[in-house]
């Protein structure tokens, strides 16, 4: 530990505490939620593999025999991509604000807001350009494979090209979509898994904006905070159906006690209930036949399941320890990159393999090649996040120095010392 701190000291900007930076970096790597995010990304990949090559298993397409689908079995969680996305959104709302609720230092929250768009946009742009290159060199085979499966999802390039709809596949369109339009207009025809980026972007700023208000209410009255958060969840549903998971993540971050406790029977039940609800297929069937959900609310069992699972992992020591480690850390690093690249891989190499070697080979190649293609993005992502950390830290320190110079003319201004600027935060990619 001492030698590690000595090596790290050479890379620490002046004014930052050595022990604090070491602790922050170690906590970032050891977080048990990294593995959960990675598993959720793999579930999305499995879901799309089934949509493309085994559509009768998903229960999403009415032209197949219902007896062959897996929907209704709790093990459906393995291919329940919609539930995995709900977990991404709740996890983002939680991770983006949890540190703020623990230390009440708004600088970290401000840095997160400043970094949010470039943090997401650079890897997204890489994924869109990757798909553009495949289009440019005629590497996609989704039309022929989709017709042979048959899979309407695959034949329309994961719903990007419905019959009669044409898209602009130029380089200019790819650059604009990857850098801007995916986030502000929801455009995602180069890679339809990127539809989650607009909710992720908007939901992030929702929790950034509301966290300080929640702190003030919590310091005033815990009961009032409960009421305010309940109103927030309901209001977010009325505004946009994708916002309630972020509101619930924020609520969990605000209300969860600081310290973990030993696992109890109740804690185990909470975790199992969360997993069971994450297997809900969006309709009353099989083990879920008694769950009747009104139209427009079908995602809420999964959202609730995600909230319960995160609560259990954060509250109980044993569950947190079991889900920590090098494998969890690796899965966390892989989660965002593999999420970004797997649809282009599936519709190109995966579809080609399907045409020549069948569905099982196509599934294996899609998963394996998606991991390989994601690896360079993993390294880029780490470099990019570290660069943004340094830039935003220096920016805030510079602004703070300017403000400190005029603090005597600004009653109520609280100076921010460089040591108060957090050196790193938990990696909050979604889907993050």
Image (cartoon, rainbow, N blue to C red):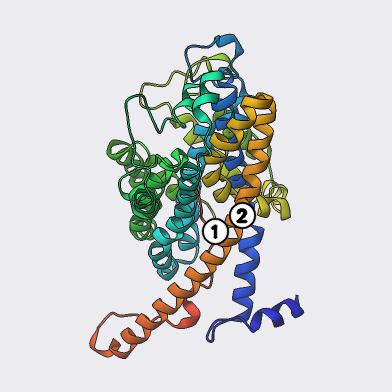
Q: Position of residue 230 (x, y in %)?
A: 36, 41
User: From the viewer's perspective, is residue 183 above or below residue 193?
Assistant: below
Mark 1 → mark 2, Cα distance in angstroms: 9 Å
Q: Secondary structure at mark 1?
A: loop
Q: Nearer the viewer, mark 1 or mark 2?
A: 2
- Quadrant the N terminus occupies: bottom right
* Residue nearest the viewer, comparing 300 with 35: 35
Q: Which mark is residue 427?
A: 1
Q: Position of residue 170 (x, y in %)?
A: 37, 47
User: From the viewer's perspective, is residue 21 above or below residue 245?
Assistant: below
Residue at the (72%, 51%) spot, across then down: 327
Q: Is residue 34 visible?
A: no
Q: Which mark is residue 333?
A: 2
Residue at the (63%, 56%) spot, across then down: 31
Determine the image quadrant of residue 243. top left
Using a 10 Å C-alpha cutoff, classify the residue at mark 1 as few (fewer than 14 neighbours), some (14 to 19) or many (20 or more): some
Q: Which mark is residue 199?
A: none
């Amino acid at each position: 530990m001492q030698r590690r701190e000595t090596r790290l000291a050479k890379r620490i900007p002046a004014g930052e505490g050595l022990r604090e930076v070491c602790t922050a970096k170690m906590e970032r790597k050891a977080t048990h939620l990294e593995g959960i995010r990675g598993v959720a990304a793999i579930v999305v990949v499995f879901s799309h593999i089934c949509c493309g090559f085994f559509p009768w298993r998903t229960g999403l397409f009415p032209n197949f025999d219902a007896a062959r689908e897996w929907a209704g079995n709790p093990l459906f969680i393995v291919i329940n991509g919609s539930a995995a996305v709900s977990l991404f959104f709740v996890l983002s709302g939680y991770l983006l604000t949890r540190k703020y609720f623990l230390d009440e230092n708004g600088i970290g929250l401000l840095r997160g807001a400043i970094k949010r768009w470039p943090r997401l946009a650079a890897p997204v742009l890489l994924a869109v350009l990757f798909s553009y290159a495949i289009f440019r060199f005629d590497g996609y085979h989704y039309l022929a494979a989709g017709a042979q499966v048959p899979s309407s999802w695959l034949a329309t390039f994961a719903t990007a090209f419905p019959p009669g709809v044409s898209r602009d596949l130029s380089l200019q369109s790819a650059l604009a979509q990857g850098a801007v339009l995916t986030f502000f207009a929801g455009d995602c025809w180069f890679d339809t898994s990127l539809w989650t980026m607009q909710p992720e972007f908007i939901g992030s700023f929702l929790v950034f904006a509301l966290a300080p208000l929640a702190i003030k209410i919590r310091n005033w009255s815990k009961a009032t905070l409960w009421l305010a958060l309940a109103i927030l969840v309901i209001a977010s549903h009325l505004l946009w159906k994708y916002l309630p998971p972020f509101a619930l993540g924020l609520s969990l971050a605000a209300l969860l006690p600081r310290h973990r406790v030993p696992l109890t029977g109740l804690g185990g039940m909470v975790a199992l209930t969360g997993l069971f609800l994450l297997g809900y297929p969006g309709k009353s069937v099989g083990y879920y036949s008694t769950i009747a959900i009104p139209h427009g609310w079908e995602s809420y069992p999964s959202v609730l399941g995600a909230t319960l699972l995160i609560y259990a992992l954060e509250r109980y020591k044993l569950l947190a320890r079991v889900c920590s480690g090098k494998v969890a850390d690796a899965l966390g690093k892989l989660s965002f990159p593999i999420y970004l690249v797997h649809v282009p891989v599936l519709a190109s190499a995966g579809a080609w393999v399907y045409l020549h070697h069948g569905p099982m080979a196509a599934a294996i190649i899609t998963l394996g090649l998606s991991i390989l293609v994601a690896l360079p993005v993993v390294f880029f992502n780490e470099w990019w996040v570290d660069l943004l950390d340094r830039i935003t830290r220096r920016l805030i320190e510079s602004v703070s120095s300017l403000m400190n110079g005029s603090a005597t003319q600004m009653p109520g201004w609280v100076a921010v010392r460089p040591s108060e600027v957090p050196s790193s935060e938990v990696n909050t990619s979604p889907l993050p």
